[in-house]
Amino acid sequence: MAYTEDDLKKELETKEYEYGFYTDIESDTLPVGLNEDIVRAISKKKNEPEWMTEWRLEAFRVWSEMEEPDWANVNYPKPDFQNISYYSAPNKKPKYDSLDEVDPELLDTFKKLGISLDEQKKLAGVAVDVVMDSVSVTTTFKKTLAEKGIIFCSISEAIQEHPELVKKYLGTVVPKTDNFYAALNSAVFSDGSFCYIPKGVKCPMELSTYFRINQAGTGQFERTLVVADKESYVSYLEGCTAPMRDENQLHAAVVELIALDDAEIKYSTVQNWFPGNKDGKGGVFNFVTKRGLCEENAKISWTQVETGSAVTWKYPSCILKGNNSIGEFYSIAVTNNYQQADTGTKMIHLGKNTRSTIISKGISAGKSQNSYRGLVQINKRAENARNFSQCDSLLMGNKCGAHTFPYIEVNNQSGQVEHEATTSKIGEDQIFYCNQRGIDTERAIALIVNGFSKEVLNKLPMEFAVEAQKLLEISLEGSVG
Amino acid sequence: MDLKEKLISSYFAFEEQVDTDSEIHDIRSEAIKNFETAGFPSRKDEEWKYTSLKSLLKEDYSIFPKKEEALDYKDVKQYLAHDIDSYNIVFIDGIYSSHLSQTTHDKFDACLMSSALSKPKYKAIIDNYFNKIAPKGSGLNNLNTAFSREGAFINIPKNVAADKPIQIINLSTGNESALMLQPRNLVIVGENSQVQIIERHQSLNDNPVFTNSVTEIFAEKRAIVDYYKIQNDRKTASLIDNTFVEQHQESFCSVHTFAFGGKLVRNNLEFYQKGERIDSTMKGVTIIEGKQHIDHNTLVHHIEPNCESHQDYKGIFDEKSTGVFNGKVYVEKEAQKTNAFQSNNNILLTDQATCNSKPQLEIFADDVACSHGCTIGQLDKDALFYLKSRGIPEKEAKALLMYAFANDVLESVKIPELKKRVNKMIAEKLNVNLGFDL
């Protein structure tokens, strides 16, 4: 690493929230509040067909009867759902032929985020579907993908262009009545990504979306749907940053993955939303429902690095429906200051010979609370199901907490489930060893934390791994006493 | 009338039988009020997610059994660990049986809760200890407190090692068509003292019995307490066993639970560590079949630094049985240098058997070593084949493996005769004769 001690020090001193800027783009925002008219208006603005409007309304009706869940190990002021504007879109929406035509201010935003589009095009080979305040602004590499028959576009575009696919799969894994936030999302989702990989196609590049929450007081409700048809493969990345805002921002996304027979989906997330300042003020509320469905011999792998958000409530799950299907979950959750995270996974084994692996690493520092909550369920017909779970927690200081809530339910004698969890701190002898070799304590901790998280970091695609590693260091800034 | 209403209205009848001028009466009336608000737990409570009391609550239990039933020693001998020279405190249908018991007031007290609650010489102790650690929010505890009248009272003063183990035996005759029992035990072990206690619940015929028992154990500085629970009741008897342990500096307390019988058994076992260098151990073996349901719910609350806790629960589930393990380790931020281990291993023998495990850690201190492990699986096929290839029939081979599986827990039993007895019970349960003692 060409990154010296001084660099780190400087970075730590100046680092508040580095992506905390606010882009001044005129937004086309709906009045605050939520009722059937707003849902209709959102649908209308997006020029959606009748069935979609009905779908949203149904979700809204269910949502209005639901209560906000409070079982998670997190504390926060409940958001006032009538005080949020449910739609905002950058209102200049020209069709670009080249990057020069793009609103320069927007390009500037991307630069600060470190996603220079042209650079990404050339170097990383990543097709970026940038979601800026809910409406997808630019999509690259579409042609390359189109040649292979891969559909990668915003979900609103998909509703227009591929209604049969959307109609067939939307809401099949996460029903609109699934939970409070999923229902809310189904009613008001503004945009998101849609991806369809046709039969037998291996997607040649990593697909990725960057999310930004931009407009003050705007909730963001993303909807992602990834369908991998038989024998196909796709690796999907999602990365997030948000500008610094004083009031809490709500984010309730839904991600649905469908892996048909013999297909494989790899879904990686780096989440670095504004976590609130040192006194726990502000920060993003992140209530996400992510779930994948595996048909026969299919595989879904979730990898996540969670360093941001004031409150995280997120359980990427796998439903292992088909025989021989595989579910994986690799997670690093870092909490500092007053952050709270309640995250984990659900592995529902329905098919025979299904396998799942859970590796979860929690690091808590400052006054934060970090919980792992996971369910491994082996149903009666899931012969020879196998699960291995490992949850390790690292505590820094005695003002934070680490919690483990695993639920293990086995109904089949041939199932084999193993779960182990440990909680510890960074060993004094480890730090001493590093100090002895001229590595100062702060660097030593970064080193040890990286080692602790290695199993998960290794699962990330290359360019993400580097970013994630740096994120870990920055997130734990000043947490060592 | 449902059971809750019945209990609340019977409380007035109960009041007439006991002294209402004492402070205990205030505790009881407060408890019945609390029970009225809290009621019985339902599956909506997170702690009761996997265990439903519904089937128990629909019986029409008689709450006040008829007067003392005389039983011959020979009829109940088998339920006492008779080969152990011990003090015995025996209750028949919740009423003390003097001719089956052997109590003492010699160097220490091993006697009755009823006398401790009423005699002035115990007042100071009761004031200090009675109902001090049983959580006030739980409906079942409050219910027991409200009706607390009888049970075992064991008070070991400073620097005394009890010369022999103490057995607490609760027998139910089945003379009532359905009976509800609420024994209340209090165990106080003074500084540098030591005691071993064996507790057992047994019904003598197939009429349903519902026992809601509360035991409070206090281990003062450097005390050593070993508590063994034998649960091998008939499949019509149900038990909710609530045991709370408060430990002080350098004390050692272990609770072993051998859960083989009963229709529905729920063990709530909670340890509170109020001092440094404390060791808490809880171990359990569960072997059940049929439609039995056994639920172990444990909590260790680490409050002070330098303490240890060990949990080791093994379960073997046959036929349509259900096993639940819900263990929690809670480490306060002051409790640095805590070592907490929790392990739960289960074997499922059929596809109808179910096992739900929820081992939890809640940790607020950084300098700790806490871990938990949980496995659910089946007998090792290779090991089974190895034994079979050496001429051991399948049934015996399986039993051998299960013995080995449960042995970790048996090994720490300190009373040799008891160990033997439990071994015998396991052999009976597995329906094998290995021809040797393990």
Image (cartoon, rainbow, N blue to C red):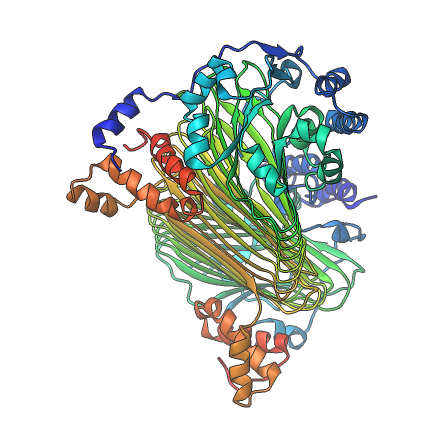
Q: Vertical placement of A278 versus B203: above or below? A: above
Q: How many marks?
A: 0
Q: Vertical placement of B394 versus A26: above or below? A: below
| Between A469 and A347, the one nearer to me in the picture | A469
Q: Is residue A389 visible?
A: yes
Which residue does the image show at 68% across and 31% down from the upper left?
A158
Q: Vertical placement of B222 versus A224: above or below? A: below
| Between B346 and A453, the one nearer to me in the picture | A453
Question: Residue B353's quadrant in the figure?
Answer: bottom right
| Between B105 and A321, the one nearer to me in the picture | A321
Residue at the extreme bottom:
B391
Residue B429 percent across, percent down from the top left:
63, 74
Question: Residue A187's quadrant in the figure?
Answer: top right
Q: Quadrant of the C terminus of chain A?
A: top left
Residue at the extreme right:
B1
Residue A99 percent across, percent down from the top left:
49, 21
- Relative placement, left or right, of A81 versus B306 is right
- Relative placement, left or right, of A82 versus B422 is right
Which residue does the image show at 69% across and 58% down from the upper left?
B238
Q: Quadrant of the N terminus of chain A?
A: top left
- Relative placement, left or right, of B11 versus B327 is right
Which residue does the image show at 62% across and 11% down from the upper left?
A28
Q: Is residue B273 visible?
A: no
Residue B230 percent across, percent down from the top left:
57, 65
Residue A474 percent across, percent down from the top left:
34, 30
Question: Residue A6's quadrant in the figure?
Answer: top left
